[in-house]
Amino acid sequence: MEIISAIIQLLGGLAMFLYGIEVMGDGLKNSSGATLKKVLEKVTGNVIMGVLTGALVTAVIQSSTATIVLTVALIGAGVLNLKQAVSIVMGANIGTTITAQIIRLSDIEAGGNWFLWFFDTDTLAPIALVIGIILLMFVKKQKLKPIGDIAIGFGVLFVGLNLMTDGVKPLIGSSAFEAFLQFFTNPFAGILFGLVLTVIVQSSSATVGMLQTVASATAAAGGATITFAMAYPIIMGINLGTCVTTAMVCSIGSSKDAQRTGVVHIAFNTIGTILFLAVMTVMQHYAVFGAEFWSRTVDSGGIANFQTIFNLVTAIVLVPFTNVLVKLSMLIVKDEKKKPSRHPELETLDEHLYISPAIAVSEATKAVAAMGAIARDNFERASRMLNKLDDNVVKLINEDEDCLDQFKDTTDRFLIGLSKAVETEWDDRQVDMLLQTVPNFERVGDYATDLVELAERMQKANTSFSETAKRELALVSEAVNEILTITVDAVGRDDNEAAKAIEPLEETIDDMIMMLRDRHTKRLKSGACSIDSGLVFMETLVHMERASDQCSSIAVMMLARNNEEILQNHYDYLREIHAGSDDDFNAARAKRREQYIKPLKEIQ
């Protein structure tokens, strides 16, 4: 009965330990996601900097798998190239060892020392849990929630470790446990065990933590213990086990370079394990450091130190061969011959990014802004087609329109999935804004193809605009192109101040459209222009006005993210500022009227 109870306690502790790592990792990713993205983006071709960056990022988010997933996603986004990604992956192996160094805190004996007493996990874990629950339940600031998650995760992690330790103690000394330890006298058995257990648990940090717990418990109890000679092959097997997860991540729906990154990681860990095993076997055979070194009992700190040394030495030895590993990966994973994408910037959204919602939101924002830029360029090209139709440009417009339509479908699915992964209110509102922005930009693209159809209609009717109408359309086109540019830049830079500049220009464009309709109606009545060209002119104004309206909608949605009043009622906000209640808006509108309405009045 005692054995069954111990096993249940061991498994319960393992569950809490794994959950603590997960919660702490999520908190770290959410609190530093945007910063991590900037760090990863600044990795240059310098391999050493890439290794250091990979180690730093992994140390922060507490997961080498998460770092590799992010790296794979950023390759797809075009942020990183293969060589940069490989160097980051090499560093990830080093960074993941920080978890083991944290776990070794459980071995601290206070011995009456107040400083050591504070860092004893029996003291530190409850304090972390109290801090975490206060931040999560009683503090309303959203920015502090991830810190609460980190504290809760840290506390739960060590509570789980303590439970695991208590669960292991009754098993120590049993004949089954001693036979189990005897199994690891064969280093290949240790490697296999570490590999299989890591594949099952899907976390090298968790597997090393389990090994540290068992080692500490056996060391404290006496009797049969885990020796250094038993431990080091298991640790190397754990490193190999992470490769299986990497292979799965890098092979499912990923680019060729992402798959190559997985190949390099597998080669890197496999070569490192083979080299280290060979060296360690020779050293053990000749009793380097003395026979007692290999047979001595290893504790949590010894396991943490060996894991760090193993990964650090492997990186030092293999970093000079980075280019060789890259070439090897390119031989194994060959390129497919396919037509290069016209807009690779629209193919950057990868569901692997969900592992870090903050980075996923950032990449989605950048991609939506790229979509807006294409829609703007298409609209500007189409506006020029009204004066002279160019079949090559028309073909270009239609190709880009197809890209926009495909991107909309892809992005809608990506953002809906992302909305379930985000954990902060700001990211949730940003995703909502992007979901509504995408169809607005897509409609701008539609208006561009509508203008092309109008141009083709004019060509077919063999008619053209008068010189006055051309000058009028050129001016309103300039205004619409400017508002589209401001909108694209505002979305791309996440700039609310730029968003505020959109509405004064939108109202000015509305006034321009109204003036031009009145003028053109008079020209039609007087016979100064043909009916065919006159109708096309009027329809052109409709599309110009609608494109401007889409920009207004995007601006309001951007401003609503951190303004509850706008969020609750967009129309009241627009009605109030149009009524002249905002001095900044009035000044900006006056400036825009001077820029566009005044020269429009001068056109005769």
Image (spheres, helix red, strand yellow):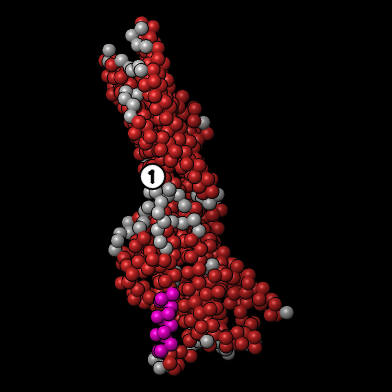
Could you tell me which residue is drawn at 42 percent across and 49 percent down? 348
Percent from the top left, x then y, of residue 316?
33, 74
Residue found at the very far top of the displayed protein? 526
| Picture quadrant where residue 530 is located | top left
Disc 1 secondary structure class: loop
- Left or right of residue 594: residue 428: right
Depth check, front residue: 259 or 570: 259
Could you tell me which residue is drawn at 44 percent across and 38 percent down? 402
Percent from the top left, x then y, of residue 602?
26, 15
Magenta span of residues = 270-283
Percent from the top left, x then y, of residue 498?
35, 36
Confirm whether residue 372 shows in the render.
no
Depth check, front residue: 396 or 218: 396
The residue carrying mark 1 is 343
Could you tell me which residue is drawn at 41 percent across and 51 percent down? 338
Amino acid type, residue under disc 1 in the picture: His
| Picture quadrant where residue 323 is located | bottom left
Our reading of the magenta stretch's main secondary structure is helix
| Picture quadrant where residue 88 is located | bottom left
Confirm whether residue 237 shows in the render.
yes
